[in-house]
Amino acid sequence: MPFLLPLYVRWNVDPALFQIGSREIRYYGLLWALALAIGLYIFYIIIVKKEKLGEKVLDSVFWYATICLIVGARLGHCLFYEPQYYLSHPLEMLYIWKGGLASHGAAIGLLIGLWLFSRKNRLPYIWSLDRIGIVVAIGGAAIRLGNLMNSEIYGIPTSLPWGFVFVRNGETVPMHPTQLYEALAYLAIFFILWYMYFKKDVARKMPGVMFGVFLILLFLSRFLIEFIKNPQEEFETTMSLYMGQWLSIPFILAGIVILIAALRKYRQRNPNPKLQRKHT
């Protein structure tokens, strides 16, 4: 009898791993913690082991990046997706445990945090930006797995054999598991940036290139996957593009500009001797 692929995956995972008293310990929170722990370890390899900058710099970048990322993610959700409600109930912006974090807000918060870190430690801003992409990519993959465990942020119906029926949300037909698509895309970006940094030494040789590549790849993948996602908020059903796509466009354009500028600077500092001989 030939092997047959399943027609779909029936997804009915309890988002709570276990309960302590009245408090639930959820996969989502644990995966957030895992993302931060992996980020700290990667920063340790980069800052302490490879670049010999010391543990004080490691502590500084971790706390600036973490606090600003979480604050930005929360404010991004409140102001981008539900501004009317949260501006009327501003104290509820502090209720992070109730959910609602936006990746584009996290990106803005992280950029601010890295700028503050760079000033504090007298490092070039582009130094921080080139290296942060490695951490963000692997952390983003972990967080998207948390979304999968919560049965949230999934896609439109599909007939593909890896479609997921999200039972806890009352779905009866297979949907695109866009959480997995994004997690795999971010994991691929992580390996690309890791190779650029550790194998090709791109961050030192061509400052700005890694950050430009990171912005383009991450937000372009987000932009494309949004086409097969369900809208997160009701108002998105009337838009030509989803909010996540509109918010991704400036980051993609910024990445293109940064990449072109970085490559031009590199070529100006390292002119091709063959081209020089042709013009003499």
Image (spheres, rainbow, N blue to C red):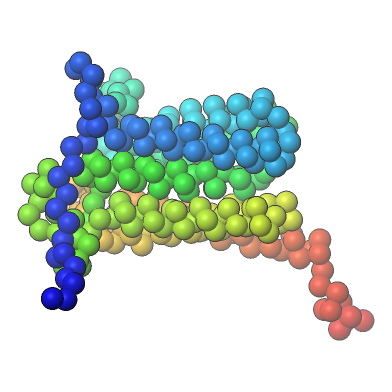
Seen in the image, is 102 located left or right of residue 161? right
Image quadrant assignment for residue 175: bottom left
- Residue toward you, 96 or 264: 96
Instruction: Inspect this view and state whether residue 59 appears.
Output: yes
From the viewer's perspective, is residue 203 above or below residue 132? below
Image quadrant assignment for residue 209: bottom right
Where is residue 84? Give x, y as percent: 25, 33
Seen in the image, is 130 located left or right of residue 277? left
Instruction: Inspect this view and state whether residue 115 appears.
Output: no
The residue located at (64%, 41%) in the rendering is 46
Where is residue 195? Give x, y as percent: 60, 57
The residue located at (81%, 61%) in the rendering is 269
The residue located at (51%, 53%) in the rendering is 190
Which quadrant holds the C terminus?
bottom right
From the viewer's perspective, is residue 279 above or below residue 95? below
- Residue toward you, 135 or 34: 34
Where is residue 232? Give x, y as percent: 24, 47
Seen as rendered, the residue at the extreme bottom is 278
The residue located at (31%, 54%) in the rendering is 180
Query: So how many labels did they put on this image?
Result: 0
- Residue toward you, 159 or 263: 159
Which quadrant holds the N terminus?
bottom left
Seen in the image, is 224 located left or right of residue 25? right
Image quadrant assignment for residue 162: bottom left
Seen in the image, is 193 located left or right of residue 35? right
From the viewer's perspective, is residue 157 above or below residue 28? below
